[in-house]
Amino acid sequence: MTWGAPRTSQPMRSPPEAAAIPRASSLPPRAVLVTRPTELDELIARHGTLAQVRFHLKSRGQSLDDLTHRHDRQAAALQAVQSAIPLAWRRARVSRESLDRFLFEPEDLVIAVGQDGLVANTAKYLHGQPVLGINPLPEFYEGVLVRYPAGAAPDALATFAANTLSTTPHTMVQATLADGQRLVALNEVFIGHRTHQSARYTLNWQSRSERQSSSGVIVATGTGATGWAKSIVRNREGAPALPTPDAPALSFFVREAWPSRSTGATLTDGIIENDCPLTLTSEMNEGGTLFGDGLEDDRLDFSWGQVATLGPADHPLQLARL
């Protein structure tokens, strides 16, 4: 799609379309840079000084060189992107840890500078804003979501200002509890036990129902099909084909279902669409949880009797395409 054409948010169809809100003419554009601390930043925060980090690593036979190299490359990419933002534009910078407290504006251009996971961490807080993924270390990060070098930023900013920035929709997964709590993720949602012991629940899908005891359930998008879901499919015969990132469909996989006198192991994977969601009813007194994209601290409790409904979210991530 081309960014800038006014639309209203609609449920995803095939092919999915997302909302695009025209920028207010009274305000200049705003670029929001999203980053996370580098490995070196985190070590300095833990040990106090660079000298202490060097001593810590040396005492374990490790070198600071690789960490310094990646830190410097991240800083250089960030500086290049910042320099490309026109002086007349508004700008903001937010760290991954502060995303849940940051107020995105409907007309922002969001620029994630870092690894692919940074885009996933950001996506759940957006509602149609385009995201430009900048990869500071293409030899180190896969680049599935951070597709462009820092040198691509000037063109992206120019096309955004001209309302001609194209985006590709990426379907997201939404989990909703019966009490109204909601969780959205870009790659996958995990439903299971917080300590990864056996999870007990009843699974319902396509008019079929099965009481299960397993290591948990993964509900993955086409974007997440390159990660955790791909690992599961690789070792499972007869698994359904994973959807493409823009398809309004999800895949679910039950991990290590245990057949017993009271639990089954026949309903272990399938495709979820808007008109055929997946529901799970918890039978866990404590420790039941749902979390998305590997962020266990950002979770919903899934205790006994709670019902979770999982399906495609009502809005996709809009990933910038140059």
Image: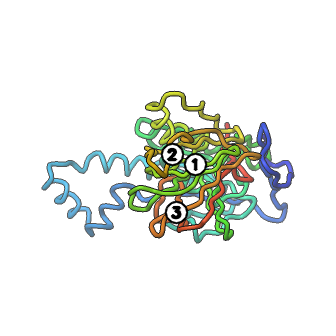
* Marker disc for residue 283: 3
| Mark 2 nearby-residue class (10 Å; few <14, some 14–19, many ≥20) | some
Dot 1 or dot 2: first in sequence order is: 1
Dot 2 or dot 3: first in sequence order is: 2
Query: Residue at image x 64%, y 50%?
Result: 204
Disc 2 marks which residue? Answer: 264
What's the CA distance linking mark 1 and mark 3? Answer: 13 Å
Labels 1 & 2 near each other (Cβ < 8 A): yes
Query: Residue at image x 69%, y 60%?
Result: 30
**Residue 254 location, x and y as percent?**
51, 45
Amino acid type at circle 1 is: Glu
Amino acid type at circle 3 is: Glu
**Residue 282 location, x and y as percent?**
55, 62
What's the CA distance linking mark 2 and mark 3? Answer: 15 Å
| Residue 219 visible to an observer of this rendering | yes
Work out whether residue 16 or residue 61 is closer to the camera in this orientation and state it.
16
Work out whether residue 20 or residue 108 is closer to the camera in this orientation and state it.
20
| Mark 3 nearby-residue class (10 Å; few <14, some 14–19, many ≥20) | many
Residue 107 found in image quarter: bottom right
| Mark 1 nearby-residue class (10 Å; few <14, some 14–19, many ≥20) | some
